[in-house]
Image (cartoon, helix red, strand yellow):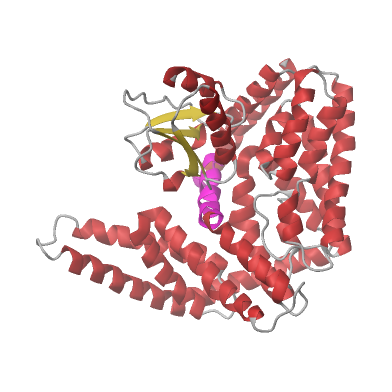
Amino acid sequence: MMQIEHYIYILKEERQVEKVVANQKDGLGTRATIQKFGRFLSGMVMPNIGAFIAWGFITALFIPTGWLPNENLSKLVGPMIVYLLPLLIGYTGGKMVYDARGGVVGAVATMGIIVGSSQPMFLGAMLMGPIGGWAIKKVDEVFEGNIPAGFEMLINNFSAGILAGILAVLAFVGVSPVMLGITAALSAGLAAVVNAGLLPLANVFIEPAKILFLNNALNHGILSPIGMEQAAKAGQSVIFLLEPNPGPGLGILLAYWFAGKGSIRQSAPGAMIIHFLGGIHEIYFPYILMNPRLLLAVIGGGVSGTLTFQALGAGLVAVPAPGSIFALIAMSPKGGLLAVLAGVAVATAVAFFIASAILKMSNQVADEDELVQATAKVQELKGNKVEVTQTVSKKVNKVVFACDAGMGSSAMGATILRKKFKEAGIDITVINTAVNELPSDADIVITQRTLTERAKTKLPTAEHISIENFLNSPEYDQLVKRLS
């Protein structure tokens, strides 16, 4: 434990130095700013993952090289990737800034960049959607309190329509050529990296970034749009396999089961099921923080897995979400399944052997308290503040778990609390949702500390409970005891 504390202390000191240097250079660039920006980017994509998967299934099934080639049904592929998916991203980006009104203006602005481009404009949609939401928000602020009674609907509708039209024209004329140039540069750079055989080195940065909870921001905010551009041309993309590969995390958990000690060894099999089958990768992050040298294991697993993918020509037709082995299998193209499974197996094996050696050399006995403390250290490493919960004295009818997308960690937490309520005979509704979609009738909102402030802003009237680990949190039992 002293070794972990020493490591965390060193990282915290390095973080302060990095922050000072970054602020001296440009006044920005802190880790918190990067995390916030990445979370915003991923927030535009994650609510629309179902649409991406639908497009992936249609592509994998009905294109000429698909599982069930069909000339008529394959006509869905082009319009969905050119129009539907970018419009959904643009609408979601505008809605994140200014609710439905911002979403509508953001979608119209996105349409301008779609029509002005000769290829799918995912990056353009991630730009124009939020711009549209921000612009109509500022226009409404100008008119607020200055509209004559009875003219509210007229002015609101015309202001949104005129602004949306202007933004669509500007996007068509001015933004599209710029985004085409950026997209072409990114595609050329990616091709150069792949041709030079350097793509596996990306995992040297991806795997540690995942441990800092940048996994969704990396995958859905940066890698997925690039992968979609590549898949639209080649029918598949190896980019979709860089972050979601469950092999490195599975290798870590297998190593704890094989070479670990104490109750942590007993917890590893359950974590493996949640990680490998359920696709919730965050479950293995605290296991690495208990012994930070295990970063070498996940990096080794990630690099070897990507090297295998590249050597065998593996790729997926669409982004797999969550990163479950089932999602990878479903998104594999015809004839490409064995290559995908081989990469996952190699990544698992390499991570397992490296992690097992590290655990045996460390000869540490871990327990549940240490696992919980390691999870808490993640928050310290990220520089998050501890939020004070707001206690509200009223009848509780609905408890809501919220996370970025409302699909992963919040779903797991809701399931656990629902079971505890049932065992205690408590008849209270427990649901999970995205933090931006909190229902107005929620009485208690449970979020990770990093999202509590956003949740309070979205729904200030509810009681807010901050937790550090959706899987194992003492707040669950405290809440059950209080409501019994």
Furthest residue to the left?
Answer: 149
In terms of depth relative to the viewer, which is nearer, 270 or 240? 270
The quarter of the image holding the C terminus is top left
In terms of depth relative to the viewer, which is nearer, 411 or 375? 411
Residue drawn at (38%, 37%) of the image: 442
Q: Main secondary structure of the magenta part?
A: helix
The quarter of the image holding the N terminus is top right
The image quadrant that residue 18 belongs to is: top right
Residue drawn at (45%, 74%) of the image: 111
The image quadrant that residue 189 belongs to is: bottom right
Furthest residue to the bottom?
Answer: 71
In terms of depth relative to the viewer, which is nearer, 220 or 407? 407
Residue 282 pos. (x, y %): 66, 38
Query: Which region is colored magenta?
Result: 26-46
The image quadrant that residue 157 belongs to is: bottom left
Residue 177 pos. (x, y %): 53, 77
* Residue 482 shown in magenta: no
Q: Is residue 21 visible?
A: no
Residue 345 pos. (x, y %): 86, 48
Q: Vertical placement of 54 versus 173: above or below?
A: above
The reply, left or right, for residue 383 in relation to residue 1 is left
Q: Vertical placement of 201 versus 286: above or below?
A: below
In terms of depth relative to the viewer, which is nearer, 423 or 125? 423
